[in-house]
Amino acid sequence: MTLYTRVNQETCISCGACGEIAPDVFAYDEDGLSYSLLDQNDGAVEVPEGLVEEVEEAHEECPTESIRVAEQPFAEQVEKTKAG
Ligand code: SF4
């Protein structure tokens, strides 16, 4: 299954659950807010197959529903210019 993910930092409450469930995907910025390590939270890079289950679990366990998942890249982020 193709899956993309990104965190809605406007609603993240820094509870730490996603980083425990999927440490290879979610980390925390200097404000303690979660973001996707896959592509700096753009939601444009496909979740590697071996991590899909963890991401889905984090999505289900997030108390504020801040972890967004989709079967297609998050469009509003795709157009963003990337350096390098
Ligand atoms: S589980 Fe949700 S609220 Fe908790 S740190 Fe992760 S994104 Fe934020």
Image (cartoon, helix red, strand yellow):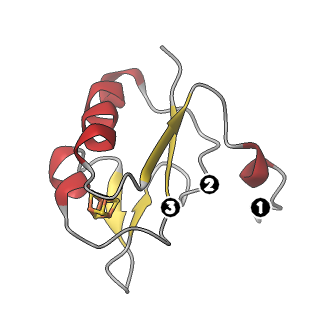
Q: Which mark is residue 68?
A: none
Marks counted in the figure total: 3
Picture quarter with the C terminus = bottom right
Q: Which mark is residue 8?
A: 3
Label 2 neighbour load within 10 Å: few <14, some 14-19, many 20+: many
- Looking at mark 3, is its residue's CB closer than 8 Å to ligand 1? yes
Mark 1 = which residue? Answer: 82
**Amino acid at circle 1:** Lys
Label 1 neighbour load within 10 Å: few <14, some 14-19, many 20+: few
Q: What residue is shown at x 59% (from left), y 39% (from top)?
A: 45
Q: Tag 3's secondary structure?
A: loop
Residue 52 lies, in percent from the top left, at 36, 27
Image: 75 above or below 11: above
Ligand 1 visible in quadrant? bottom left
Q: Tag 1's secondary structure?
A: loop
Mark 2 = which residue? Answer: 42
Q: Tag 2's secondary structure?
A: loop
1 and 2 marks in contact (CB < 8 Å): yes
Q: Nearer the viewer, mark 2 or mark 3?
A: 3
Marks 2 and 3 sit apart, C-alpha to C-alpha, by 11 Å
**Amino acid at circle 2:** Asp
**Amino acid at circle 3:** Asn
Q: What residue is shown at x 47% (from left), y 69% (from top)?
A: 9
- Circle nearer the N terminus (1, 3): 3
Q: What residue is shown at x 67% (from left), y 36% (from top)?
A: 73
- Looking at mark 1, is its residue's CB closer than 8 Å to ligand 1? no
Residue 19 lies, in percent from the top left, at 23, 56
| Near-viewer residue (81 or 58) | 58
Label 3 neighbour load within 10 Å: few <14, some 14-19, many 20+: some
- Circle nearer the N terminus (2, 3): 3
| Near-viewer residue (73 or 37) | 73
